[in-house]
Amino acid sequence: MDSGISSTISALRKTPLNALHRRLGARMVNFGGWDMPVEYPATGGPSPGGLMAEHKAVRNSVGVFDVSHMGDIRIRTGKTPGGALAAVQHLSMNDAAKLAIGQAHYSAMLYPEGTFVDDVIVHRLGEDDFLFVINAGTREKDISWVRENVKGFDCVVEDLSDAYTQLAIQGPRAVDVLQKLTNTNLTTIKNYWFTHSTVCGLANRMIARTGYTGEDGFEIYVPGDTKTSEKVWNAVMEAGTEFAIIPCGLGARNTLRLEAKMALYGHEISETINVWEAGLDRYCKMEKPEFVGRAALAKASASGLKRTLVGLEMIERGIARDEYKVFDAAGEEVGVVTSGSPSPTLCKNIALAYVPPALAAIGTTLLVEIRSQRAKAQVVATPFYKRPRKAASQAVTS
Amino acid sequence: MAYPANYRYTKEHEWLDAKDGVATVGITDYAQSELGDVVFVELPPAGTKLTKGKSFGTVESVKAVSEIYAPASGEVVEANGELHNKPETINSDPHGAAWLVKIKLASPAELDGLMDASAYEAYIAAKGKEASA
């Protein structure tokens, strides 16, 4: 047997909760240069983990992730007000002017070619004060990109990546768990809004209703020292006991985000894939007069797409995996899988793949090459999983 | 989980239980715990000739694909069809019900190079230390 999972190397970076993950017996992997838990033990603890159990905990109740490897860049006012907003508008494809203070949105920083530097969550902290939450593997690249591209703007850029421990508490019961640890009425925080309040006795901490699981949930930002981080982690676990909360690793984070069709840098988005191909049009505001990448995107939309991102479901036996080749019914190679996995929620084998637009219609039969054999798949609607909305579930139960 | 004393083990984490020239082959408890939740198993049909050290099938968990290597050369006399519908048996009973194939050994002398249970346990203990260093 050869698991193909890279083992740990001592030079990897560690989050403040690294020792805790190891004490819990988590299987650790190298994720973008970080020593991160991929899953927690399937046996031994009071609430057994393992990728499948962790995934289901988030879909059905609640789970907690250490996402402190994510980076944070603050862009705030320089000498005169307005400079930070102007800089953000230049860097980010979404329209930050539309954000209220306390609101966040999904966006991306683009190269002049209209391809991805990284995707980001932009938080508006103040009138002229913003926080970008960025990917772990692209931290250095992102911070240099930001510094380089705000040179003409009157703003201050701070790399706060190591200042915070970031915990994602995700699942339909996340609100119940976190409510026990703060006096702020969490039901007043809407999806993709945030507030600053006391959490676990720590004053003025950011609490955001965001996540990367396709489920309701919160991300909290607390001081990045090990003692405080472990204290908060333990408080979350204790508050979640009645909801059978379990720690969740990057394995479940990946299957959860894939079911919800949320992009992963280096897979669905990269420096060679543009916004139109990735299908992220609704986060890209072409009505803004200017941002890095805009001109190329204006041209690209006129010239038509060569490939587009589709959802696949395997019809024949076999699991499509990242980088497997895709063929059309006639046997012509037409594309590639960007992310593929069994879906624990749907009990199907699903994948995202780039194919020519002519083959993107729902119901189109395609073939995925799995270890030199081709297995049938079909194009399906995405996201693969959409969480039941409150109003809908109430209508069903009343 | 205990490693049966009568089995032989490989560095690639397969086990082999030989009786009267026929060997039952599976993957070890250590292997299944490294893989996580097993969701897919692909095995060769009866009659397939296996060569020691060569891949003869795959076991997939949610997150990873894993090749299985033949611990000895021989011909497959039976593949465990139960695993097709219940691959998770590999997680729950890797040394028993989740055997993968039975092979008619081509050369029983090949087994001499395999580890016994205590050598295998020492081998995985050393791997554990390496990973946490």
Image: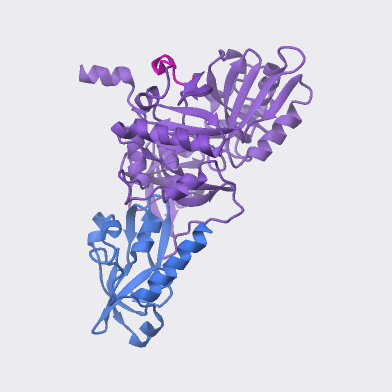
- Residue A350 visible to an observer of this rendering: yes
Q: Give left or right: position of A297 versus A327.
A: right
The image quarter containing residue B115 is bottom left
Chain coloured purple: A
Q: Give the image location of residue B81, x and y in percent.
A: 23, 63
Task: Please say which color scheme the image uses.
Answer: by chain
- Residue B9 visible to an observer of this rendering: no
- Tell me the magenta residue range: A184-193
Tint of chain B: blue
Location of residue B7 with respect to A49 vertically, above or below: below
Residue at figure coordinates x 37%, y 37% from the top left: A363
Query: How many numbered marks, from 0 up?
Result: 0
The image quarter containing residue B47 is bottom left
The image quarter containing residue A294 is top right
Q: Give left or right: position of B15 versus A164.
A: left
Return the residue nearer the eye: B15 or B117: B117
Q: Give the image location of residue A270, x and y in percent.
A: 60, 40
Q: Give the image location of residue A251, x and y in percent.
A: 43, 45
Which residue lies most toward the right here?
A152
Q: Give left or right: position of A68 versus A378.
A: right
Location of residue A12 with respect to A97 vertically, above or below: below
Which quadrant is the C terminus of chain A positioned in? top left
Location of residue A275 with respect to A97 vertically, above or below: below
Q: Main secondary structure of the magenta part?
A: loop
Residue at figure coordinates x 43%, y 66% from the top left: B125
- Inspect the magenta stretch and tell me whether residue A112 lies in it: no
Q: Give left or right: position of A112 versus A388.
A: right
Return the residue nearer the eye: A221 or A304: A221
Which quadrant is the N terminus of chain A positioned in? bottom left
Return the residue nearer the eye: A6 or B107: A6
Q: Give the image location of residue A113, x and y in percent.
A: 68, 34
Residue at figure coordinates x 72%, y 12% from the top left: A81
